[in-house]
Amino acid sequence: METESGRDGGPATSIINVCGAALGMAVGFAAIFISTNGVFIPAVLRDFHWGRAQAAQSYAASMLGLALVSPLIGILMDRFGVRKVVLISALVFAVAMACMGLQDGNKVWWIGLSLIIGMSGAATSVLGYLAILPQWFDRRLGLAIGFAMVGLGVGTIVLPALSAKLIAMWGWRTAYQVLAAISLAGALLAFLMLRENRKVHRPMGAVTHGTPTGPVVRHRGLKVFIIFLGAFLASSAVLSLGPHLPALLMDRGISAQDAAKSASLIGLGILVGRLSSGFLVDRVHAPFVACCYFLCGAAGFILLGQIDSYEGALFASVLVGLAIGAEGDLLSYLVRAYIGLERFGLFYGTVFSGYSLGAVVGPVVTGHYFDTHKNYSLPLQAGPVLLVVASLLFVSLGRYMRPGLRHGDSMHQVAIAGE
């Protein structure tokens, strides 16, 4: 792993930052709230006598909150530094998670608190923890991101099982509070491990010689919009299946147990996608890597529209997971490569909000279509189209901001060099 040398640290500091980011994401918003959401729903239904759609609104509300505040979180990270913003976010997020155990069945309170959890947890997701790695890595940034994202993968595997055990032992209210304590403890440890590179970070309002203006700013704005739109379309497609895949497979005659196993293999695909895409983007043009994985996801959709066998469902699930895992890795890398480190938080937060919005729109539209037509045919047909369009958008980005970047070039120089 390559890093800037000097007073800010060496390779050991960079590796510790990767480990800190991995730990933070393993106990952050995505792992500890989103991945466990479905585990809590049956217990909540029993207590409040709600329908499944009402209980599941917490997922959509939290993702909407995440999308709404992502650009603001990016601005705050630019101004005050990543570590401070992540720490404050983790504190508020843990309190909000603990308050989930105080629910009394009021639907407004249920949705409102979920919205707050998404907003407060934004910086504890990849938005916060992956924003610090471009300060320390250049040529091997993709590999660093891939290793850090393994933490998120481990969290999404371990925490749902842990949540189920906690609910069985102490009930869902106490389980939420225990998870909140775990999240806060992990975030504090991650905070101690993370370091900012003072050679790179500048307050957002600082005036720096060479700061791009005029046509360069407009050009960067166009790049940000393209990445935002590509992220939105891709996540609308690949994340639309999350809540619906088991039911879709059961409609094809696959048993409930086998359908659950097939859906779980999406997690395997995500983990493989994160590691392999991180390795590849350091060696292959990132938009081409995105195309490869998005086309795998498109193939997965096509297979899901045709297969009726358990083996086919397993293979299709892995393909869709590859696309999900790769997209999560690529956004930070694309912003670093095409926009640079100047106001990185703002631009990364903006494109990440596109990814988050897709996570809301995709599942909701898919569920509405099924409720109306009693099948998933159109969403399965639309998925490959959206992924192909997203691939074309990323390819249209062209060359990196500094295509001739050499080992030893200062990241500070890259950030202010312009186009």
Image: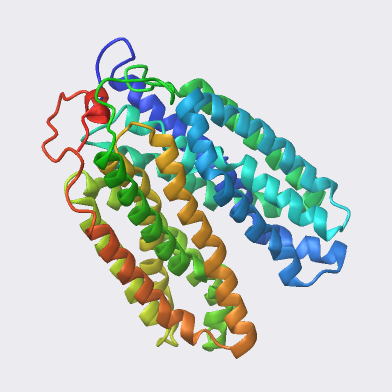
Instruction: Name the spot of residue 215 as percent of width and height, x first.
Output: 25, 42
Nearer to me, 409 or 202: 202
Q: Is residue 99 visible from the viewing direction of this image?
A: yes
Q: Residue at x 31, y 9 (%)?
A: 7
Nearer to me, 289 or 347: 347
Instruction: Name the spot of residue 386 as percent of width and height, x first.
Output: 38, 71
Q: Is residue 81 visible from the viewing direction of this image?
A: no
Instruction: Name the spot of residue 341 as percent of width and height, x first.
Output: 32, 32
Q: Residue at x 45, y 64 (%)?
A: 266
Specify the quadrant that holds the N terminus. Answer: top left
**Numbered disc total:** 0
Specify the quadrant that holds the C terminus. Answer: top left
Q: Is residue 202 left or right of residue 190?
A: left
Q: Residue at x 64, y 58 (%)?
A: 59
Res. 46 image quadrant = bottom right
- In the displayed image of the protein, which residue is found farthest to the top? 7
Q: Is residue 399 left or right of residue 298?
A: left
